[in-house]
Amino acid sequence: MAYTNIQTRVLMQVLLALAFLSVASAGRVLNGKEQDIVLFQYHNGPLLNGKISINLIWYGQFKSSQKAIVADFITSLISLSQPQVQPSVAMWFKNIDKYYTAIKSKKSSSLQLSLGHQISLQDYPLGKSLKVQQIEQLAAKGDQMNAINVILTSSDVAVEGFCSSKCGTHGSFHSKTSTVKGKSPRFAYIWVGNSETQCPGQCAWPFHQPIYGPQNPPLVAPNNDVGLDGMVINLASLLAGTITNPFGNGYYQGPADAPLEAASACTGIYGKGAYPGYAGDLLVDLTSGASYNAHGTNGRKYLLPALYDPSTSTCSTLV
């Protein structure tokens, strides 16, 4: 089962109407269903733990410089042992430990992410218009055990539901190549699309003016690539959701088939003082004028979504 994480669903629908807000598990849910207010809670299922490789599956045309933006983000998540300028991507990721603490899990320290394989499918083997089933087909090209396979589709690839209802999804299914004690283990996958030419106002805000709400000037993207910087926001949101709700019975709010998760529960919030149409008080690069809230490896800067803090029941930001 796949979970869409984008702009807002449900309670967040009101915010979407006021001002297109963006984020994601992917990030962001672009439309939603009315639902009763349900508290963010744990549903007794497993969270990801152990050694997990993040494999990147590039579908379509991407420049090497674009691939480096995402690869450096993944590397930044796991650089706690290396000195980093604060606030950092690693600090953002460390906040996910609170979910393990909340359920008194002893496994949080065993979660070890690493950048795995990168697969390039630049010749569009499944065409330029993909169905959900084809996204799962692409996910199966990566490792099917102890892995999160991330499919990234280029700006000229249309995906079922992309822009109309989602900026990305995450889900899981049983391995067809591996067995553990006679059973097929489940592995997780994430899909994120490059919205630069299709719907940047929906899936790359605040680096592009929103379709709805206050038309404030867009922020300057920290890596000078509206599409890729937007993808990082959605990837970060979906990654948080994948770790804390990998199989649909972890942490979330609302219905299981349209959950608000660790980051999508805080849609549109990137810094303190955020409100509909305003991302919050962010750091600004004095040279480029770019807005960001996290430092990464290789001198990178990123804008990352707020995470829901289960210990305080509030959305927590880095700045």
Image (spheres, helix red, strand yellow):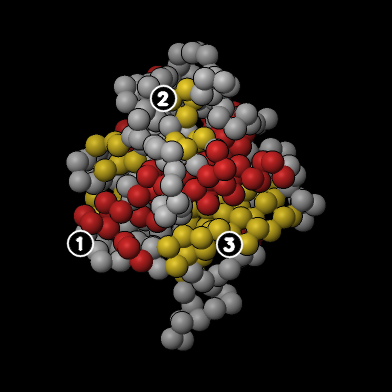
Of marks 2 and 1, the one in the foreground: 2
Mark closest to the chain's N terminus, 2 or 3: 3
Q: Horizontally, is 43 left or right of 206 in the view?
A: left
Looking at numbered disc 2 in the image, what kind of residue is underneath it?
Leu
In the image, 156 versus 235, the foreground residue is 235
Whether tag 2 and tag 3 are in contact, CB under 8 A, the answer is: no
Residue found 46% across the figure and 86% down from its top: 182
Q: How many marks?
A: 3
Residue 184 appears in the rendering: yes
Residue at mark 1: 104
Mark 2 or 1, nearer chain start: 1
Residue ranking furthest to the right: 123
Question: Would you name the residue on which mark 2 appears?
Answer: 282
Answer with left or right where residue 121 lies relative to residue 139.
right
Q: Quadrant of residue 5?
A: top left
Residue at the farthest bottom position? 182
Dot 2 crowding, Cα within 10 Å, few <14, some 14–19, many 20+:
some
Residue on which the image places disc 3: 116
| Lower position in the chain sequence, tag 3 or tag 1 | 1
Residue 201 screen position, x and y as percent = 56, 25
Q: Amino acid at mark 1?
A: Lys
Which amino acid, by three-letter code, is at mark 3?
Gly
In the rendered image, the quadrant that contains the C terminus is top left
Task: Tell me the element at label 1.
Answer: loop
Q: Residue at x 30, y 37 (%)?
A: 316
Looking at the picture, how far across and down is residue 116, in whole percent? 58, 62
